[in-house]
């Protein structure tokens, strides 16, 4: 074996001839504490929100987005996780139809729950 090696390539060349050169002392493994999985908050029920926070009245009219905003605020206050928007809209629409509240789209494209009113929050 002739020639002068320097730097990294020299170490690789020596490691190919002498396997002890390739082995370096191992650092002790750092053990991270095992933490319990993060708990997800319970999901807020749109049904419970409607029953506790929406009143029916013949001449009432509430904007659907206000009901959804009220639901999300209620979930935050109760320490619950709100369901995603599409599920919330589907659930609120189904619940409203069950209790006689009509969903109508106004000429300005706003969506209203006719026959419903959002009760003022007690906070």
Image: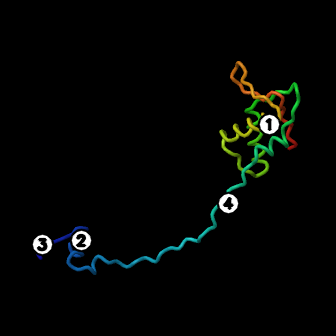
Q: Which residue is mark 1?
A: 98
**Vertical side of 104 occupied by 28: above or below:** below
Number of other residues with Cα within 10 Å of mark 4, as a class: few under 14, some 14 to 19, many 20 or more: few
Q: Is residue 32 above or below residue 89?
A: below
**Which one is closest to the eye, mark 3 or mark 2?**
2
**Residue reaching furthest to the front:** 98
Q: Residue 50: horizontal and vertical position, in percent?
A: 81, 40
Cα separation, mark 4 vs mark 3, equals 63 Å
Q: CA distance from mark 1 to mark 3?
A: 89 Å
Residue 108, by quadrant, is top right
Give the farthest residue toward the left: 2
How packed mark 2 is, by other alpha carbons closer than 10 Å (few <14, some 14-19, many 20 or more), is some
Disc 1 packing (10 Å; few <14; some 14–19; many ≥20): few
Quadrant placement of the N terminus: bottom left
Mark 3 sits on what residue? 3
Dot 2 or dot 1, earlier in sequence: 2
Element marked by disc 4: loop
**Residue farthest top in this picture:** 107
């Amino acid at each position: 074996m002739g020639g002068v090696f320097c730097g990294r390539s020299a170490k690789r060349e020596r490691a190919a001839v002498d396997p002890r050169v390739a082995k370096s002392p191992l650092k002790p493994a750092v053990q991270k504490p095992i933490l319990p999985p993060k708990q997800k908050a319970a999901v807020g029920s749109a049904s419970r929100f409607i029953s506790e926070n929406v009143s029916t009245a013949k001449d009432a009219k509430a904007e659907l987005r206000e009901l959804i905003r009220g639901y999300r605020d209620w979930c935050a206050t109760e320490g619950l996780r709100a369901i995603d928007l599409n599920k919330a809209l589907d659930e609120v629409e189904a619940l409203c139809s069950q209790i006689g509240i009509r969903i109508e789209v106004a000429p300005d494209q706003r969506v209203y729950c006719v026959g419903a009113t959002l009760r003022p929050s007690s906070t």
